Image (tube, grey):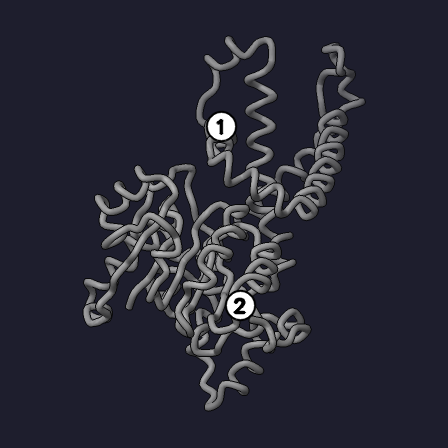
Amino acid sequence: MRVAIIGLGLIGGSWGLALREWSRSEEGKNSKLEIVGFDAKATQRNEAQKQGVCDRTTLTPMEAVVGAEVVIVATPPLVMRETFEDIAAHLSRGAIVTDTASTKREVLRWAKELLPDTISFIGGHPMAGKTASLEGATATLFNKCTYCLIPLPNAQAGAIEALTRLVEIVGGRPHFIDPAEHDSYVAAISHLPFLMSVALTNLTSESEGWREISKLAAGGYQDMTRLSGGSVTMHLDICRTNSDAILDWLDRYQQTLTDLRAVIEKAGLYDEEGRPRPSAETDPVLLQDYIERAHKARERWEEERARPPQIEGLEQINLPTKKELQAEYTRMFTGSWLKRRTPDNGKK
């Protein structure tokens, strides 16, 4: 099996290392796995080979995909359109093409527009990551992580099953989702936290007292600002390709901060001028309730996160024909989104 990985950063590198580890296992030892890598940076290509991410690298993405049965595009979001244009004419008939971008609507549009109907495109997004690049890649990065999968309507049933199995092989938990829902949800739990981190970092580091403030900054500040150390290019692309969903959640967050401010003002022992307030005018109940609600909500989330998923892959669907498989797949996993669309069989 030949796998091409375009973009040899944290995610692409971790895919390569995880597949390499699988190829040494009892299940994968007969796979004849060959991993071909490409990255625009020569240093990344050299380091990827040194780390064992890939067997060989190429100077262009077009060379990398020749003869590949699976193509994983792990570039920043706005680079993907150009990448699809570059590789389209060089993809093998029947190849499985997937991506790892944090936004899905634009990527799916580009794939539908630019890639041939002779391949199966299945959008992907592993809910795992670090602020590191290739140096942080590990074979276990995807272990127990939710791995979002969103096929184009004309993706072959066998290709969907195959990629689902590959995701499981590298440790992920396949999760099929509507692209608009995906982009809204990750705006809330991934993109908004990054922007909160950026805002806090800029607010504090650009304040007049930062020189002295920085001497006191410790664990809490480090935790809250860690995300602002991530890739500038990647997050810029994320904000541009998912701006509507991000703005929606920013508006909600802004209102939440306004509400929180009012609650703190009600509970505070001092007014805005720093003058003590009469105890009869203060009320900590609302603030305590506000904090306790968050505490309990996070505990529930941690408990739910620890539970194994109810549906981990398409192998649980045992239907004799592709048509029946697609119908059941539509019903169980992607709901109305896949039902609304039909393959454009006349394209390319």
Q: What is the three-letter code of the residue carrying label 2?
A: Pro
Quadrant placement of the N terminus: bottom left
* Mark 2 touches mark 1? (CB < 8 Å): no
Which residue is drawn at the image coordinates 76% and 27% (left, top)? 266
| Residue in front for this viewpoint, 48 or 280 | 48
Query: Within the image, what quadrant is residue 283 found in?
Result: top right
| Residue in front for this viewpoint, 117 or 227 | 117
Nearer to us: label 2 or label 1: 2
User: Residue at label 1?
Assistant: 220
| Residue in front for this viewpoint, 116 or 277 | 116
Q: Is residue 89 above or below residue 43?
A: below
Q: Residue 241 at what x, y percent from top left?
A: 62, 47
> Is residue 85 toward the left or the right of residue 331 in the image?
left
Q: What is the three-letter code of the residue carrying label 1?
A: Gly
Which residue is drawn at the image coordinates 66% and 44% (left, top)? 243
Q: Residue furthest right?
A: 281
Which of marks 1 and 2 precedes in the sequence? 2
Label 2 vs label 1: CA separation?
A: 40 Å
> Is residue 47 toward the left or the right of residue 198 in the image?
left
| Residue in front for this viewpoint, 210 or 157 | 157
Q: Residue 175 at what x, y percent from top left?
A: 50, 64
Q: Residue 248 at what x, y percent from top left?
A: 72, 45
Q: The residue tagged with tag 2: helix, strand or loop?
A: strand
Which residue is drawn at the image coordinates 51% and 61% (left, top)? 123
Query: Within the image, what quadrant is residue 95 found in?
Result: bottom left
Q: Is the residue marked by circle 1 packed among few (<14), some (14-19), or many (20+) residues within 10 Å? A: few
Dot label at residue 151: 2
